[in-house]
Image (tube, rainbow, N blue to C red):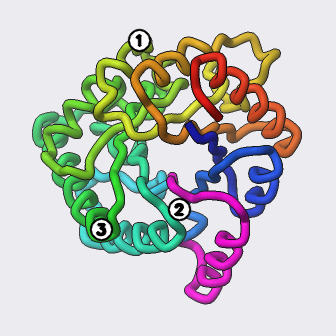
Amino acid sequence: MLLGAFGNIGQMEMIKTAGFNTAELDLGEIMGMDLKTFLNFERRAERSGLRFDVFSGLLPLDIRIHEPGFLWDKWLEYVDKAAERAACLGAKRIPFGAGKCRSIPAGCEDREEAEKRLAAFVGEICCIFQKYSLEMVVEPLGPANSNYLNRIGETADFARSLKRENCHIMCDLRHMYKTGDPYHAIISFKKEIRHAHIDHPEGELRRFPLPDDGFDYQPYLEALHDSGYDGILTVEATYYEDFEEEAARSCEYLKKCAKAAGYQV
């Protein structure tokens, strides 16, 4: 298993120094670059010593797929450009979280139709990803983030229903904790899970897992190991006092936890 960390472009060197193998950067930041800036960044990424297998933030969080004025073709064009840039940087898969974007609107009179609309949109994204040899990993999200596709089982059913060979799912400790999804769901749906996130799941702030934070991470890591998962475990920490110091401590701690679960890291 490889360990990765969320971060912005300015934190890449700190992620590497902390001991992580990969950086999961935000596609919104990548998409904000003009072509010259992107090409310069591509060279910087190649020299960083990091892998960039996964990128998050596929869609801006303020769009709403179910709104009448949603510009379907515009956002698929955006996805195409984002996928192309991610692939140039070495990406293998991109999560589809976009919680509020995909949520079924309150008072929706035809939920079945809304679910079909989302399925059609995600299916088209999968077709775009196929051009760049990318996998889609649909993320089950807790109720604070979305009102649709909250648990691993229902998300696996959704992914399978699309009948796209590059559509899979992922797991996230925080969302499993918030929904009460049991750890054995990781084993039950091991064939579908292609990516994993972790952070300190208690409270609302995403913090680095640390040895003194009072949470037991071992069952999550053991479930991943027992499922045969050998991909990337990315720390999704977006709140910290000292990124560099906390990232290094977290990486060291997670390596110990992973080894105790049976991994070689």
Tell me which segment is drawn in magenta: 31-56
The N terminus is located in which quarter? top right
Give the amino acid type for the residue marked by disc 3 in the picture: Leu
Label 2, secondary structure: give it.
helix
The residue sitting at 76% across, 31% down in the picture is: 250
Rendered view: 241 above or below 53: above
Camera-side mark, 3 or 2: 2
Image side of residue 134 versus residue 113, left or right: right
Looking at this view, is 55 or 264 the one in front? 264
Label 1, secondary structure: give it.
loop
The residue sitting at 70% across, 29% down in the picture is: 255
Question: In this figure, which residue is indicated by the disc labeled 2?
Answer: 27
Q: Give the image quarter of residue 208.
A: top right
The C terminus is located in which quarter? top right
Q: Give the image quarter of residue 226.
A: top left
Whichever of labels 1 and 2 marks the residue nearer the N terminus, that label is 2
Point out which mark residue 76 bears.
Answer: 3
Whichever of labels 3 and 2 marks the residue nearer the N terminus, that label is 2
- Distance from disc 1 to disc 3, alpha carbons, whole Å, reads 35 Å
